[in-house]
Image (spheres, rainbow, N blue to C red):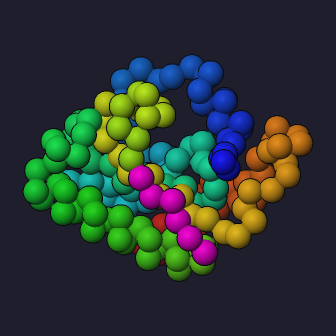
Amino acid sequence: MEYIWAPWRVEYIRGEKPEGCIFCELPAEGSDEKNYILYRGRKNFVIMNRYPYNPGHIMVASYRHIATPEDFTREELTEHYEIVQKSLKALRLAFNPQGFNIGMNLGKVSGAGIDDHLHTHIVPRWQGDNNFMPLLANTKVISESMDSVYKNLKSKF
């Protein structure tokens, strides 16, 4: 059995959680660069994960506060997955990853950090992106700053 370890995320897990819902509040602020919002559709948007597994870890979320895919309207669902496609294209142009992990964590027991607002994670992957640092030094090396990733990706949307 293989395990994916992400000990650097403990900062988020143990840290103080903001009041309210970031997927509702951050788009409403209108400060896209500050909040790392990369793209806005009519029903969904793309935001960078502040606690990424890899550079370019992004999330597609609906503007409407819903918890499961069954709650999507047909229009929301269609646009959500169109934006997933658009995001894959942007990530390929920006970073040329060799693969992706894409998925949703539905419910607290699935590992969802935010379990009441549906979002799809897209994590670019490269051969060897898991190295000895997390195991030996309890440290994850993220090779590019959030601001640099934002500027690079934003231009690809």
Q: Position of residue 153 (x, y in %)?
A: 52, 68
Q: Position of residue 54 (x, y in %)?
A: 64, 56
Question: Is residue 8 left or right of 72 when viewed as pictured?
Answer: right
- Image: 138 above or below 33: above
- Residue 115 appears in the picture as rendered: yes
Q: Residue at the location (60% across, 48% down)?
A: 52
Q: Position of residue 108 (x, y in %)?
A: 41, 27
Indicate whether residue 100 is drawn in magenta. Answer: yes
- Image: 53 above or below 14: below
- Image: 70 above or below 96: above
Q: Residue at the location (52% across, 77% down)?
A: 92
Q: Residue furthest left?
A: 74
Question: Is residue 118 left or right of 103 when viewed as pictured?
Answer: left
* Quadrant for the C terminus in the image: bottom left
Q: Residue furthest front?
A: 1
| Quadrant of the image occupied by residue 60 | bottom left
Question: Is residue 62 left or right of 50 when viewed as pictured?
Answer: left
Task: Please state the extent of the stretch shown in magenta in the rendering.
Answer: 98-103
Q: Residue at the location (57% across, 43% down)?
A: 50
Question: Is residue 143 left or right of 73 when viewed as pictured?
Answer: right
Indicate whether residue 106 is drawn in magenta. Answer: no
- Residue 25 appears in the picture as rendered: no
